[in-house]
Amino acid sequence: MANKDRVTAKFGKGYAAQLMAFNIKKQRIVDLCNVEFDEDLFDETKDYSSWNRALNGKEVWEGIVDALHDLWGDQVSHPRKYLPHDDPPDDGLQDWMKQIAPAPWWRDVLQLSASQSAFNAWFSGRPMGKAKVAEVKAAVDDWWARLMVAVERAEDASLASDMARSKGSGRSARSIDSYFYTKVVEQGMAVNRHAKLTP
């Protein structure tokens, strides 16, 4: 089918905001969505600009929008799949943190006392005072513990929804869907009330 004949669609801005809040970077969203296309024998990965246009609310090929909706749905129902498998370690904490977000995001979310330059240096592998490092570890541990509680609730809600749907009640994951996004992302996953949205 020629490109001009392809059906187009728009990805809702609310969904895009939720994906960005959880994934932090557009590139991570693109990489996750492109896995599906990369594994398809009849298709190929899509370029960054196409995904970027979709996330910015522009009209794109509907296959791009479908993939974004699929990712959103899976992250609502199974957020644990998209997070580090292990708890924050004592050694190599920076590498663990880098799986989630860059240094400026972490410092802002955790509301650390270290300056941005000192934290950036530590994040890059240079030393920082023991008290400051201990503060980072404690803040990350607290953030992770809160996140795991919210993840467990999100996955329990998804399981309950699946069970209700299988019994014919008509409820779907979308009816309580956004337990994870509304309760976790928007209402309290920050370490304190001044912090930015967290995944």
Image (cartoon, rainbow, N blue to C red):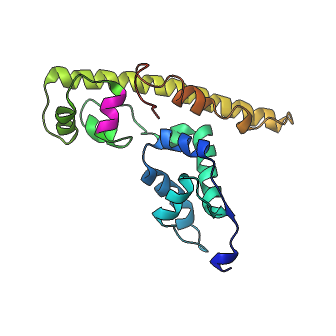
Tell me which secondary structure the magenta stretch mostly adopts: helix
Q: Which of 101 and 125 is in front in this view?
A: 101
194 or 154, which is in the foreground?
194
Quadrant location of the N terminus? bottom right
* Residue 139 horizontal/vertical position (percent): 33, 22
Measured from the top left, where is residue 125 in percent x and y? Answer: 17, 41
Asked if residue 59 lies left or right of residue 139, the reply is right
Residue 158, compared with residue 150, is above or below; it is: below
Report the magenta residues as a range. Answer: 104-109
* Nearer to us in this view, 57 or 36: 57
Residue at 38%, 21% (x, y): give it.
142
Rendering quarter of residue 108: top left
User: Which residue is located at x 52 percent, y 63 percent?
Assistant: 50
Q: Residue at x 60, y 26 (%)?
A: 153
Is residue 31 placed above or below 95 in the rendered structure?
A: below
Q: In which quarter of the image is residue 137?
A: top left
